Image: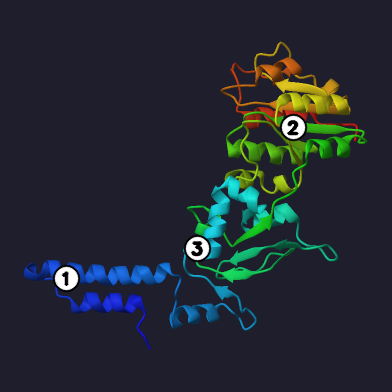
Amino acid sequence: MMAHPRASFIATLARTRVHPTSRSTALEASARASRAYAASTSRGDYDDAYDDRRREYSNGDDDYEYVSSVENAAVKRLAKLCKNRKFRDEERAVVLASSTLMRECFGTGALGSTKTRARVLFLSDTASVPPGVDAARVLRAPERVMKKCAGVANADGLDVVGEFELPHVLTRGEFEKKYASKATVRVLALEGVQDPGNLGTLARTAVAFGWDALALLPGTCDAFNDKAMRAARGATFRIDLVVFDSFDALKTSAQTLGMDMYAAEPDASQDVNPERAQSTPRACLVLGTEGRGLSDEALGGCQPVAVPMAGDMESLNVGIAGGVLMYLMRSTTR
């Protein structure tokens, strides 16, 4: 049987004596062995040792393919989905990393409920397919491959990585039709929020306080960015998303639905009135970034409101300010 490149590499080093007079020869031999080993592993090859490891975790019933190389096509596909928005949009796919995140997105697959299907699922050596999820293809992989799939540097808690279909994003017409007959509506609109951590945090907070939809205006980052997904903790799959190509388009939809529009503005002449805001049947809160703030169109088309603050502080991070305002403006008439 042909020796594994790793063994050949070690044997080459053992045979090569590094004396001052032959140092260049030794280095050349070592380099050749290194290149042979690297070339083999980059092709994703593995011999009996890898087969033994795959069988070790099979437990008799587990016949999943074991992927050991980060150059595997499925691994590279997930890595690209994590980092490339255009590719995500073209493939209508998103990567979820960890069984905890999958549970937060889809639930636990209770008896009688429909399971969510993954296009492909990577499992760590000791992980199982999460409850509530099944997959067209299941593979096992070591830690370094799992990290590559998830686009992260730290594998703590990274037991499962999967590719799933993107949630449906409402068009403007679908948004208006869905909310036309609802008695109470709460919409959070983000304009120019480019930090994915802030976007994810705001989505998570909106779900926690019972807000209905997240509207994304120009300049806002992708809600399915891997960092945004981790910060949202499943909220992106549990709130309606709608994209508007301008603030004027959002304002027109708000008028169609009879929504009162509020804009978070640190210099507003008045703080938000919780009693009035909570009793308002339909409301839309527009947030911008801490540094650039909202556009003139947004400030001119909304009622500016500020976060009540007892201390002397000029402004708050948009994730914090948005959370406070969403709590104060949550509907109490549902």
Report the amino acid beneath label 2: Leu
Q: Residue at x 64, y 48 (%)?
A: 89
From the top left corner, tell me how far across and down residue 148 is, in percent. Answer: 50, 58
Asked if marks 3 and 1 touch (Cβ < 8 Å), the reply is: no
Q: Determine which residue is flagged by label 3.
A: 145
Q: Which residue is drawn at 68% across and 57% down?
A: 164
| In this picture, residue 310 sits left or right of residue 248 | left
Q: Which of 232 and 244 is in front in this view?
A: 244
Report the amino acid beneath label 3: Val
Mark 1: give few (<14), some (14-19) or many (20+) Cα within 10 Å: some
| In this picture, residue 246 sits left or right of residue 144 | right
Mark 2: give few (<14), some (14-19) or many (20+) Cα within 10 Å: many
The secondary structure type at the circle numbered 2 is: strand
From the top left corner, tell me how far across and down residue 46 is, in percent. Answer: 45, 76
Q: Determine which residue is flagged by label 2.
A: 188
- The image quadrant of residue 161 is bottom right
Q: Which residue is drawn at 26% across and 79% down?
A: 11
Instruction: Pick out the residue farthest to the top.
Output: 269
Instruction: Pick out the residue farthest to the bottom.
Output: 1
Which badge, 3 or 1, comes first in the chain's sequence?
1
Quadrant of the image containing the N terminus:
bottom left
From the top left corner, tell me how far across and down residue 168 is, in percent. Answer: 75, 47
Q: Determine which residue is flagged by label 1.
A: 26
Q: Which of marks 2 and 1 is in front?
A: 1
Give residue 222's mark: none
